[in-house]
Each structure stands twice: as C-alpha cells, then as structure tokens.
C-alpha cells in the first residue's frame, strides 16, 4: 500500500489491473497533489501483497479490500479500478453500499454484457489461455518480462508510455510463483465471477463512471447498457482519447481530468 496527499482529505483508493501493480497509478497520484488522500494497493497476492493461497474470485477480493478500507477507517471513499481492478470494483459495488463513488476503467465485467461477445473476440485469446490450470505458469515463469511486453505493446495505443523501468517493476511483482499464479487466477475465476455478478439486479445508486480508451475497441454504449441492466442506476461513461488499454499511463492527464470531473458532480 502506498499513500500520498493529506490524511484529512477525501480518500481515493486505486486498484490496478493485470499485468501491473500499484505503481501503475503513480502519475495519477502525482496529478492529485494534496487535494485527495490517494491510496494505491497491490491487488491481493500480487507484488507486496500476499495470500495464503492464490484465489481470484472478485467477490472474495472485494471483501478483502473492504476489510482494509474498514481497518483504515476511511470515509467517503472513491474506488477506482482498472482492468482486473475494475472487476473487483464492480464486485465491491454489488456487495457493499458504502462507497462515495466508483470509477471502472478498461475492462469487461464477467457475466455482464457485452461479456459473451467479448469472449468470442480473438484479440483477447488470453482469457481462455490464462484459465487453463498450471499451463500458463509452465510456459511463462521463465519469460515473465517478455510475455508481459507482448500485452503492453499489443493493446496500448502508446507502448512507449510504459517505459522500461515500469515494465521491469511489473515483471518483478509477478516473479514469485505464487504471484504469477495469482495473476492467472484472476482469469480462472471468471465463471464464478459471472455467477456472483448475476445473483441479483438490485439497484445500485452509487455514482459510477465507466472509462474506456478510444483504441480499446468495442461499443461504449453496449457497456453502459450492460451496467445499467445489472443495476447501476447512476452511471456515466467517458472515452479517453488517443489511449488504448493502459489509459492511466498512456493518458494520465485525461484520466485525472475525467476523475476530477466525476468527483465535482457529487
């Protein structure tokens, strides 16, 4: 866990995606300055965080995040999640009605449309590969950095926005065998996640913003419809121009502007 900003300020808790760690939010936290209390976490089991055993179901992980927020006695929390962190953020919304607001970025939510169509997209072949027990670890464990580089280069609009030092940090956060497996467990839990996410469509009035890089592909309106049908009644959406999947690093100023605009409306 890394913090910046005054303890007395409204808190923003940041959850990273795969294959990254808390430091994916460094530029956003710098832009926040002293206006907010920013807390960036390694997802459970990744980097400096440890689990007794790898486990990827997002309702469980959201419960751990809730325990931390409660232990820190954080009030009026805005939870921001990117990629897998966005899935955890959605799971948090489904379970806990304690957030001031939520921001979900660059992800599709298991079981929530357009989930099924996303699974047929050949460009996200890794969803199926990572779900195979044990095999990804065998093929990747001695080539973590090279494997991760493929994704930074293939699904970002600006690969140079993820420089060598950042790539080395991210690879190091998954070098431990347990951490590498935890990263794949995020994917192996998708069927459980889908079932959990569809338990109910109870209304969730938490102000929520969904952001997507303009080069991500997909129809933003389809994602909005899926969220609303899943119960999110107070949803706005936005596009981060000239960014791909790794928008917080590719276009941090735009992302921070979108976050602050969202918070200003609360």
Image (cartoon, grey):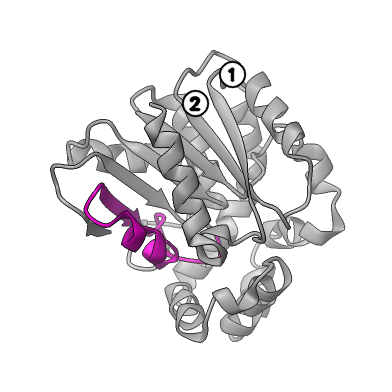
Q: Is residue 22 visible?
A: no
Q: Residue 49 location, x and y as percent? A: 34, 61
* Number of numbered discs: 2
Q: Nearer the viewer, residue 83 or 102?
A: 102
Magenta-span inclusion, residue 102: no
Q: Secondary structure at mark 1?
A: loop
Label 2 vs label 1, nearer the camera: 1
Question: Residue 189, position in %: x, y?
Answer: 60, 46
Quarter of the rendering containing residue 229: top right
Residue 250 percent location from the top left of the image: 57, 66
Where is residue 132? Give x, y as percent. Answer: 71, 60
> From what the image shows, is residue 2 above or below residue 6?
below
Q: CA distance from mark 2 to mark 1?
A: 9 Å
User: Quick one: quadrant of the N terminus?
Assistant: bottom left
Q: Are marks 2 and 1 in contact (CB under 8 Å)?
A: yes
Q: Which residue is mark 2?
A: 94
Q: Residue sitting at 76 percent across and 36 percent down?
A: 114
Asked if residue 19 is among those painted magenta in the image, a careful observer would answer yes
Give the magenta range: 18-45
Residue topped by disc 1: 231
């Amino acid at each position: 866990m890394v913090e910046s900003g005054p303890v007395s300020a409204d808190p923003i808790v940041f959850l990273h995606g795969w294959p990254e760690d808390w430091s994916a939010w460094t530029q956003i936290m710098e832009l926040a300055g002293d206006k907010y209390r920013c807390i960036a976490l390694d997802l459970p089991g990744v980097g400096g965080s440890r689990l007794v055993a790898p486990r990827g179901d997002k309702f469980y992980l959201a419960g751990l995040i809730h325990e931390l927020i409660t232990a820190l006695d954080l009030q009026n929390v805005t939870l921001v999640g990117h990629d897998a962190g966005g899935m955890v953020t959605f799971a948090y919304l489904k379970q806990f009605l304690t957030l001031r607001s939520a921001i979900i970025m660059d992800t599709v939510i298991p079981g929530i449309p357009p989930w099924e169509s996303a699974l047929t997209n050949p460009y996200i072949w890794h969803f199926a590969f990572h779900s195979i027990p044990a095999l990804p670890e065998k093929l990747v464990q001695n080539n973590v950095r090279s494997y991760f580089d493929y994704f930074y280069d293939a699904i970002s609009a600006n690969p140079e926005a993820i420089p060598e030092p950042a790539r080395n940090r991210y690879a190091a956060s998954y070098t431990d065998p347990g951490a590498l497996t935890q990263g794949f467990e995020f994917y192996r839990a998708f069927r459980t996640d889908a079932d959990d996410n569809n338990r109910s469509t109870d209304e969730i009035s938490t102000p929520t913003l969904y952001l997507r890089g303009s080069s991500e592909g997909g129809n933003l309106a389809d994602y909005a419809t899926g969220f609303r049908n899943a119960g999110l009644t107070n949803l706005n959406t936005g596009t981060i121009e000239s960014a791909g999947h790794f928008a917080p690093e590719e276009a941090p100023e735009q992302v921070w502007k979108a976050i602050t605009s969202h918070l200003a409306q609360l």
